[in-house]
Structure formats: C-alpha cells, structure tokens
Image (spheres, helix red, strand yellow):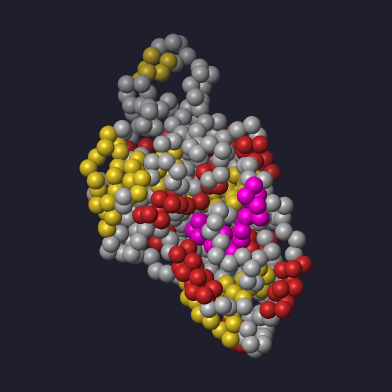
Amino acid sequence: PPPPLVPPAAIARDAEVSHVETAATSHHPVPRASGTGEEGLGVGQSLWPREADGLAQGAGMLLADGDGAEKKKPEVDEEHKVLNEVLDLVDQHFFDLSNEKSVGDSASSHIYNSINWDQVRAEEASKPLKDRKSTYKEASKVLSRLGDKYTRFLPPEDFQKLTKYDSTGVGVLLVQREGGLYVASPPLKGSTADQEGVQKDDRFISIDGVDVRQGKSPFEGAELLSGKKGTTLKVEIERRGTRIPTVTLERKISVDNPVTSYVIGAKDGCRVGYMRVREFNGAVKRGVSTALRELRDEKVDSYVVDLRGNLGGVLEGSLEIAGLFVDEPRPDQKRTIVYVKDRSGKEEPIWAQPRLALDIETPVFVLVDRKSASASEVLAGALQANCRAVVVGKENSFGKGLIQGAFPMSDGSGTIITVAKYLTPKKGEIQGVGVIPDFNIKIGDARKAIKTGVLNLKDAKEQIAACVPPDYDDGVSQTEKRSGTDSTLEQLNGRTKSPTPKKDSLFRSGNANL
C-alpha cells in the first residue's frame, strides 16, 4: 500500500490546550519487508505478514517452526488490531527528537527514544486486552514510552473535537493521487459525508458542477466544498471504478471566523489596518483574505497583524496567509514560506501559492508574544525572512517548530504523532528558540500603541529596506534534483514536474496542522 498522506485542510489538536499543531492524515499499516522480493516501505517491519487490506492474516496463515513443522499463527483479535494500527503509525512516521541528528537511523533501526520497537510489538502481542477501554489505555501507555509530549492517543470523543479545523464543513478530507482527488480517510462521524455514505478512497469526479478529475489540488477541492453552514452542494463520486449516484451534502460544521479587523488613525496621520488573528482554524484563510481586501480598499498606510496569544492551528492557514503578502520574483523563481525537515533528514521548501498575493508593498507589523506558537511562528517567520514585515514583541515567540500528524483510526479514535519539524525561509531554528523580534517592545493595548506612535511606520520601512531576503528557489523541488527520489513533501508543495505524484505523500499542506 502507498504511504500515508496529509489531506488538504489540516486538522489539529486543540492548540489552546496542548500547543500541538497537526497534519491530518490517513494511513496504511506498514508492510512486512522480506528478502523474498516482497515490497516494503523501508520504514520498518510488521510483526506478521499482511493482507492487502493491511490487517494481519487470520488463523489460515501457516508458519514453519525450526523443525519444519507447520503450525497456525494465532489469530489477531479486534483489540490488538486497533493497537497494531498505533504501533504501525509510529514505525511509519515518528520523528525521533531524541536522535534528531540521525533521525533516519532511528527509522531504519526501529529504535525510538532508545526503545526497540520490534520488541515492543512482541511484548504487546502477548498482553491480554479485554475491551476497547483497555486497548485505549494500552495505546496511550505505549506512546508515552516515546518520550514526546506531543505524541498521544485520542479516544473517539476527543478526536471528534478536531472538526474545528475542518475547512470544508462536510467532514471530508481530500488528498491528491493519480487520477485526481480522493477521500483520504473515513469521514468524520456524524458529518454529512458520513451520513450520506461517502467512503475512504472514493474518487471525486465533480464538486458542485466543477470537474476535479485533473489539475485540482486538495486546496482547491476544499475551497469548492466549503461554504456557509446550512447550504448544500452536489458531488459526483466514483468508487472502485464505478460511478455512484450524485450525492447531496449539507455543510453542517460551523467554524467561527477568528479574524477581527478595523482601521486605526496613527499619531502621524497615517491610517493603520489592524488585524487580530486568534487562531488558525478552518476559517482563517477566508477571514484574513476578506479583512485584507477591505483594509486595502481603505488605502491604509501599513498593516498590523496581531498574533499575540495565538497558539497555532492549521498549517495551511499560515502558508496561504503568508502568500497574500508576498509575490514570485519571476515566473521561474519561487518564494519559500517555510522549510520542513522530515524524519529522513530532508529539508524541503514549501512555496507560496502563485497569484495569491493581495498586497506586496504596504509595510506590515507582526505582533508576537510567548504564546504565539507553531502556525503563528510560521507566518511571522515567513514574512520577516522575506522582508515583508517587522516582528514586534518584548520576547521571542513560543518556540514550537514541530509538526504532528492527526491519524484517524479504523474505530473513530485517533493517534497524534510528531512527524516533522519546520525551519524559517532562511533555515533558522524555531523549535526551542522562537521567532526573534526586530523591535523589542512591549505593546500592551495595540490601539493605544498605534495612536501614540509606539508602532512607527518609519521604523518599519527602514528595517524592511535593510532586510536581505533569502535566495529564491528556482522552482524545482530538491527532491527532483535528487533524480526524482520520492519526497514526503512533494504534494505539500504542489510543485512537482509530474501533475500526478507516483505515490501519496506524508503531508498535504491543505491539511497539515502545526
């Protein structure tokens, strides 16, 4: 089976509680590698051989002991199947912070936080699990051994709370594969997609009359699906090669606009467009786009983007918001928003989406504090490094440079796993450091700071003029420069030479939450 991927509109753990931002994903259990030509993913072995559906084979599987006698392998019960999903995810995706310099070695040796994961599998296989509650408790216990506070297990009732990061409103997550857009994971329980029978791996033919079989990214698919709560849309779906009747979906999931904006008159007579972004949820991109257009039309002299107290959320939001302020220098050059380092050690750029920019000239102030984390730091770091903004704050931002994947399990529960880390466009470290302000000033009340001239437009212009931007990317992914090696970030970038990646990739910025 192909490796997992992160669909278009990332869902994340409630950042207000945990500072965790995630990349919503689906997954397939790791196939067993062998010396007999059986294909493996190079990220670990399952304890037992696997059927095509990823589940361990039952009592009909015969194994040979040392004497050559055949005996049946014990059948894996339903509780251990769920637990094995969790164990497989660690082997597929876990970014081992305890061994970051040789993180790729951890993945190939199956040793994480000095723990032999193959041995863990053997131990867990022999433990009795009497019911689902026991399974969930054991899953949490085994993940805690990894020593990563962001990696954890969520029962169904907690995993369902992630719907605040669903930007579509219909409970479905999309991923790009060969042939177009597919449903990445089972629809959220209770959502309209779930009620109408939409299934994992269904292929979308059209969304509200728009053909999405070719050339549409998960970003664009999510945009077509999203809309005001209570409205409906029609989708055409293909399931295992067979068209099914047109499905009508109602947008039931309501996500509050986290953006507040207005114009403030400054002491020097300048007009300042103020935007407060409380969190990066599924509605943040639309909220900032609307606010920016309105403020631009008011002919403001500068913008203030207030990220204080914003603990993060959906990575897609920070990437696309950054793209509203930056341009592509030339058609053959790309503006890097952030670098992502995956567990193989590769550092790859995520570029600004082309033709998204709404204002590439008006100076920007970004306000941060110790509670500005993850996606907030991606946005602040991107605008600062690309010489579009000055960062203002009394101290560095929080310093969370890790990405978590939110993986739906077969029974509606979920597993959150640290899968990568990110760096600024100048490859500056965020994890444990944070974004360093250009001006070390305690702001307090933003309106007062603007009116009294604490936020000075002249200072911002001078700082931006003196800024040296990073080298522009030539528009060819680092993966392609390595002779076409598969990359976990090809889909996230959406910039591969081939319009249809050979494999599903781990990330999809549309649904990558930080």
Please state the horizontal and vertical placement of residue 117, each as a whole percent of the image: 53, 37
Q: From the image, which quarter does the N terminus lie in?
A: top left
Q: Picture coordinates of residue 266 (x, y %)?
A: 62, 86
Residue at x 37% of width, y 23% of height: 73
Residue 25 seen from this side = no
Q: Position of residue 450 (x, y in %)?
A: 62, 84
Residue positioned 31% across, 52% down in the render = 208
Rendered position, 242 above or below 265 = above
Q: Position of residue 18 (x, y in %)?
A: 50, 62
Horizontal relation, residue 436 to residue 121: left or right: right
Asked if residue 318 lies in the magenta stretch, the reply is yes
* 445, above or below 154, in the image: below
The magenta segment is 314-337
- Whether residue 38 is visible to the viewer of this picture, yes or no, is yes
Q: Is residue 131 left or right of residue 299?
A: left
Question: Does residue 427 sit above or below 125 in this rendering?
Answer: below
Q: Is residue 468 left or right of residue 309?
A: right
Asked if the magenta segment contains residue 436, the reply would be no
Q: Residue extending furthest top?
A: 68
Residue at position x 44%, y 46% in the image:
216
